[in-house]
Amino acid sequence: MLQIKNVHKTFNPGTINEKKALNGIDLELNEGDFVTVIGGNGAGKSTMLNMIAGVYPVDCGSIVIDGIDVTKLPEHKRAKYIGRVFQDPMNGTAANMQIIENLALASRRGAHRGLGPGVKHKEKEHYQELLKSLDLGLEDRLTSKVGLLSGGQRQAITLLMATMCKPKLLLLDEHTAALDPKTAKKVLDLTEKIVAENNLTTIMITHNMKDAIAIGNRLIMMNDGKIIYDVEGDEKKSLTTADLLAKFKLTSGEELDDDKILLSE
């Protein structure tokens, strides 16, 4: 489903601000894989997702999604293959538009848009059913402005919008980091439910090691722009946070000192 081969990315090359963000990333995902990604600040986690999405061009290497080489495709042409949810609940939705308008835009992503009528009755019923599945009481608030919703409600709607058209690949960039613990758990539960129901190939960045172990079928650890640990199946399920810290020290030769990760133990 996803093949990343020898991808490199350096920002500000040849200057005092040069930063090697990715140093030869190799990663292959099978259809339906749910991969959690951990690592300290500056490890290259978000940069890897941005490379996949086409936010930045790669310096060298290749990216293939479902057999299609997207390496040189711009971001807007990759969008039909990818669903994204960002850390900030303010991203991913149009705050000044109604819930129903946001969902309609998401459902039409990549489709030809003519001058026909707006949201049809059947579409409205479909959106209500989707919102009902979130169990947040939003199915009766279709005309509410998204900007008036809580962070957790907005993030749940963003997740719904990102997966409505069943993307080839779902990218989650710390999508619960800005939420309180109770709301974060709710959104994570919804994430697991939606991913499982649609068999979505998913990459989720998180700073919470317990979540990284508990969620998905595979875990990768990054440091200094490289993947330094890749584990799946029963071996992943049996891990502890202490195991991950020890593995980081063993493979990188240094202590993991990212406060966000350490506080999530």
Image (cartoon, rainbow, N blue to C red):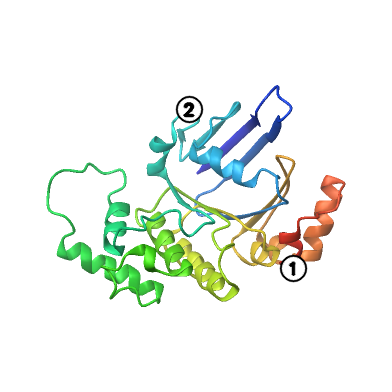
Q: Position of residue 46 (x, y in %)?
A: 60, 46
Q: Mark 1 belongs to which amino acid?
A: Glu
How far is mark 2 from mark 1, CA to CA? Answer: 39 Å
Residue shown at 60% from the left, 41% from the top: 47
Q: In terms of depth relative to the viewer, which is nearer, 96 or 30?
A: 96
Residue shown at 13% from the left, 45% from the top: 115
Image side of residue 222 versus residue 113, left or right: right
Q: In which quarter of the image is residue 132?
A: bottom left
Image side of residue 75 versus residue 125, left or right: right
Which one is in front in this view, the residue at disc 2 or the one at disc 1? 1
Pointer 1: what residue?
Answer: 265
Q: Where is residue 24 in the image (x, y as percent from the top left)?
A: 68, 33
Pointer 2: what residue?
Answer: 72
Residue shown at 65% from the left, 61% from the top: 212
The 10 Å Cα crowd at callout 1, few under 14, some 14 to 19, many 20 or more, is few
Q: In terms of depth relative to the viewer, which is nearer, 222 or 136?
A: 136
On residue 167, the disc is: none
The 10 Å Cα crowd at callout 2, few under 14, some 14 to 19, many 20 or more, is few
Q: Where is residue 175 in the image (x, y as percent from the top left)?
A: 54, 59
Q: Mark 2 belongs to which amino acid?
A: Lys
Secondary element at image label 1 = loop
Q: Where is residue 129 in the image (x, y as percent from the top left)?
A: 29, 71
Q: Which residue lies furthest to the top in this view?
A: 14
Above or below for 174 versus 143: above
Q: In terms of depth relative to the viewer, which is nearer, 228 or 131?
A: 131
Secondary element at image label 2 = loop
Image side of residue 217 versus residue 168, left or right: right
